[in-house]
Image: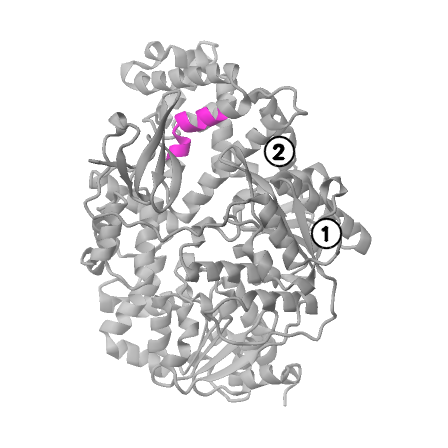
Amino acid sequence: MMDYLQTLNEPQLEAVLNTEGPCMIIAGAGSGKTRVLTYRIAHLIQDKNVDPFNIMALTFTNKAAKEMRDRIEKVVGSDARNLWMGTFHSVFARILRAEAHHIGYPNNFTIYDTDDSKSLIKSVVKEMGLDETQYKANMVYNRISGAKNKLISWQDYLTNPMLMGDDASNMRPEIGNIYRKYAERCFKSGAMDFDDLLFNTDKLFKEHLEVLNKYQHRINYVLVDEFQDTNLCQYFIIRKLAAVGQNVCVVGDDAQSIYGFRGADISNILNFEKDYPELRIIKLEQNYRSTKTIVDAANSVIAKNKAQLPKNVWTANEEGTLIELIKAVSDNEEGRLVASSIFEEKMQHQYSFSDFVVLYRTNSQSRSIEEALRRMNIKYKVVGGLSFYQRKEIKDLLAYLRFSLNQQDEASFRRIINLPKRGIGDSTIDKVVVAANDHAISIWEVLENAPSFLGGRASGPIEDFVTKIKRFGVEIQNKDAYEAAAEIAKSSGLLKELYEDKTAEGLSRFENVQELLNAIKEYVDDPEKEDKGLGAFLQEVSLVTGQDENKDNDPDKVTLMTIHMAKGLEFKNVYIVGLEEDLFPSQMMLSSRAELEEERRLFYVAITRAQKKLFLSFATSRYRFGRLKSCEPSRFLDDVDQRYVKVSSKFSNNESLSPNPNYTKSFVSGMKRTISSQPVVKPPNAYKPAADFAPSDTRALKEGMKVEHPKFGFGVVVKMEELGRERKAKINFSDFGEKTLLLSFAKLKIHDN
C-alpha cells in the first residue's frame, strides 16, 4: 500500500479505494474532504491505471482546482495535468469550444463577463424604450441568471404564467421580453455569458445525443466537490455524463449548504440516493479541526434541522474551553467589547492578530467592528469586500454631504454631479472645470452662473443641481447632522435608487447607507458630543478613516468577513457577532422552514470555522433606520447546548448577567422577557397581488381609506403625516401589522371602502 494511503483513517480509506459505481461521500466539517478527493483521483491514476484523460473532477473555485491538481501531481507526477479538472464553467467551456457548432455557435465564441452582460442588458432596455430605473441591469441580469440555472429558456419563461405573474406584480412585466432580446443578441454576436456555459452544455447534450454519447464514453469517472452547492443545471449535466458508466462520486456536506440565494439546491444532495439506488454512502465524521466543545456545540445546533442527512461528527482533539457569550448594550459597544477581547486573548496566549476572525451576517455590520479596532490600533483586513467607508455607496453619500457643506470641494463635485444620473455628461463637467480655470473662479461660481458659461441646453440640469445643493446647505445650518444627512440621502435620490434595486447586492448597498445614517444618529445622540452638526461628524469620520490610506503588506491582521465568505476557511479564534432576531437569522429568511434551516446551517458553518476558541455576541439595542431599537437575542443561541457555553466576564460596567458562570436556557429566556415583553411574531408568507395590480395616485390618500400593497396585502390608513415635502402613511395591514410608508416610495392601490 502506498504511503499516501497510510495517512488515511478507515472511512477515508474506504472512500479512496471504492472507486466503482455511484458513491456519495458525506464529509463533515474539518473531516479531510479535500485530501480524500485528491487521493481518490491519485488512486485511480496510479493504482488502477485509469488514463487521466478519462477522469473529470469539478470544483467551484479555481483555487480549489489548483490545490487539488498540485496535490495529485505530488503523488502521480505530471500525468495530473491531463485531468479534466477545473470549475464547472471552465470544464464545460472546454467542451463547448469543441462542440458549439452543433447548437449554432462558432467554436471561437466570446465569453461575456458579468459587466459585459449587464452592459448589453442596459442597451436592450434602452432600445425597448423602457424605464432604466425600473429595469435596472443588475436586477434583470439576476432574474435571467436564476432562470438559466433552473434550465428555463426565454421561450419557457414567456409561457410560464407564474414567472410572468411575478414580474407583473413587481411592476416589471417586460423582463421576459428583455430575456428574449438579450438571448437573441448574444446568439447573433456569437457570445455566451457565464450561465450559458452551463445552460448550453445541457442543451448540447439534450439535443445532440451523439455528442453526449461521445463524452459519456470518454469520461469514465466523474467527481464533484462541494456537491451541496450545485444547482439544477449542474446536476442534470453531471447525471447525463455519468449515465453510462455510473462512476459518479459526489463529495459534500448538506449541513454546509448555504448558497440557496445563488440557486444552489440542497435537494440535489438530500435526494441523490433516489436517483442512484445502488449508491454507496461513506461518512467522514471525524473532525480534525476543532476542540470537542466546539464540535459538540455545532452538533447541538444542526440537530434542530429536519431536512438533513444523519451523521455524527466527532473529534479526538482536546476538550477545549467553553464558548463565551458576550452581551453588549449597543452595536458600538459590541464592537468595543470584541476589539478588547481580541487584544486580551492575543496578549494572554501569544497569538498573532491573523489568528482571529470576526464573522457577521451582513456587510453593514462591519462598521462598528472596524471603528473599534481602529481606536485600539489593531490592524485588520476586510475579506471579500471593501472597508465600510471605502464602499461606493458610502463614498457617494459622504461626497453629497461634503459638497453640501463645502461647495469648493472639486473631488466631491465630480463624484456627485451626475449621481443619480441627471443628464450631465463628462463633456459638460470638463467645460465647468475649464471655465473655472479660465476665469480664475471656483467651480461653484460657474455652476451658479451656468447659462452664461455653458449655454441654455446644458445649464438646465446644472441649475436644478445648484438649487438642490443650496437647499441642502440650509438643512445643514438648521438641523443636526442626522436630520440633515437623512434629508440629503432622500432628496438626492441616492436612497431611492438603492431601495429600488431588489437584488442581493442592491439590498446590501441599501443596508450600508442605512448603517451610515445609523452611525450619524448615534453620533448625534452621544451626550459627550458637544457639536451635533454635520461638519463635526464629517471631521471625525475623516480622522478615523485616514488610516485607510496607509496601505501596508503586513499579514498580521484581524480578518473581517461575512459568514458566506468564510466557508472552507478556519481560524484559531472566531467571533460571531450580531446574534439577534431579524439580523441573524435574517428577517428576509423567515417566511418558510427551508429558509430558516438555511440560516441555521449558516450559523453551523460559522461555528465550525473555529479551531480553539469561539465567541458569540449580541447587542440588546441597535440603531435601525435612525432609531435606537431593542433587540432580542437570536433563537440560535437557544439551539446551542447549555453545557458548552459560559457568560463572558467582558461586559460594560462589569455588570453580572448570571450568578452561574455557565450559560443556561433560563438565562437566555429571561433576557428575552426583559428585553421585549412582546412575543416574537413570525412573518406570514409574502402576499401575492393580482396580475393586474397597478398603484394609484396617492395624493388624495386619507385616513380610513382601504389600500393594497404588493408585499403587505390589504390594510387601512390609520394616520397621515407630513415630513417637509414628504408624506407618510401609517397603515394597519391585516397580516403584517402596522407599517409606516413613505408615499413617494410605496406602491399603494386605493380600494373603495
Q: Position of residue 472 (x, y in %)?
A: 45, 18
Q: Position of residue 160 (x, y in %)?
A: 21, 58
Residue 246 vertical placement versus 514 (above, below): below
Q: Position of residue 657 (x, y in %)?
A: 71, 48
Identify residue type, mark 1. Answer: Ser
Residue at x-position 34% and y-position 65%: 198
Spatial CA span between label 1 and label 2: 38 Å
Q: Label 2's element? A: helix
Q: Label 1's element? A: loop
Return the mark for residue 429: none
State whether the magenta stretch is mostly helix, strand or loop.
helix
- Mark 1–mark 2 contact, CB under 8 Å? no
Identify residue type, mark 2. Answer: Thr
Can you tell which quarter of the image residue 340 is in?
A: top right
Horizontal side of residue 13 vs 221, given as left or right: right
Q: Which residue is mark 2?
A: 545
Q: Which residue is mark 1?
A: 658
Can you tell which quarter of the image residue 452 is in?
A: top left
Q: Which numbered mark, 1 or 2, is in the foreground of this view?
A: 1
Residue 699 vertical placement versus 669 (above, below): above
- Residue 30 seen in the figure: yes
Residue at x-position 28% and y-position 27%: 702
Residue 546 covered by magenta stretch:
no
Where are the magenta residues, as a range?
485-496
